[in-house]
Image (spheres, rainbow, N blue to C red):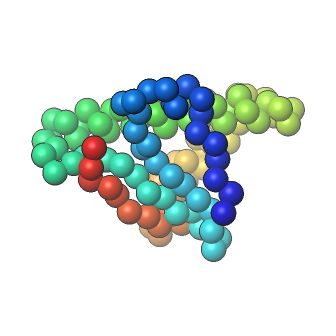
Amino acid sequence: MHELKIPPQVEGDTKAIELARVWWADNMSHASLRMGGPNTTRDRALAEIDEWGVVLGGMVRLLAQGYGRYEVDETETLVRLKAHFLEALREIDPILAGRHHDEH
């Protein structure tokens, strides 16, 4: 397995938590996500959903910037990511397997 390094900005933060791990194996993606908790209310769940939107948006922006190293325009990357993201949401059987961790 080829694990990524923890960003140096995270190592000094005693309150940092890992939100997601995603792998590609057996021709599909696999994920483990931290969300909610035993005492999570509907209002807190909705706030977390909003926070996940910010996190996912930031990840997409990092991808778009990162692929610039390969002479791929950031806007082109964003357009392609958006198209495939929406396509994956429409699929009946998405190629994602995983589990949710209800702990904080």
* Left or right, residue 55 beside residue 100: right
Q: Is residue 92 above or below residue 65?
A: below
Image point (66%, 63%), residue name: 1
Image point (66%, 36%), residue name: 63
Q: Residue 103, image x and y in percent?
A: 27, 50
Q: Residue 58, image x and y in percent?
A: 53, 30
Furthest residue to the bottom? 26
**Among the 4 quarters of the image, the one containing residue 40:** top left
* Left or right, residue 32 beside residue 3: left
Q: Residue 54, image x and y in percent?
A: 43, 30
Residue 90 seen by the camera: no
Image point (44%, 64%), residue name: 98
Question: What is the count of numbered marks?
Answer: 0
Residue 93 seen by the camera: yes
Furthest residue to the right? 71
Q: Residue 73, image x and y in percent?
A: 78, 29
- Quarter of the image with the C terminus is top left
Q: Is residue 25 above or below residue 66?
A: below
Image point (56%, 35%), residue name: 59
* Left or right, residue 22 beside residue 81: left
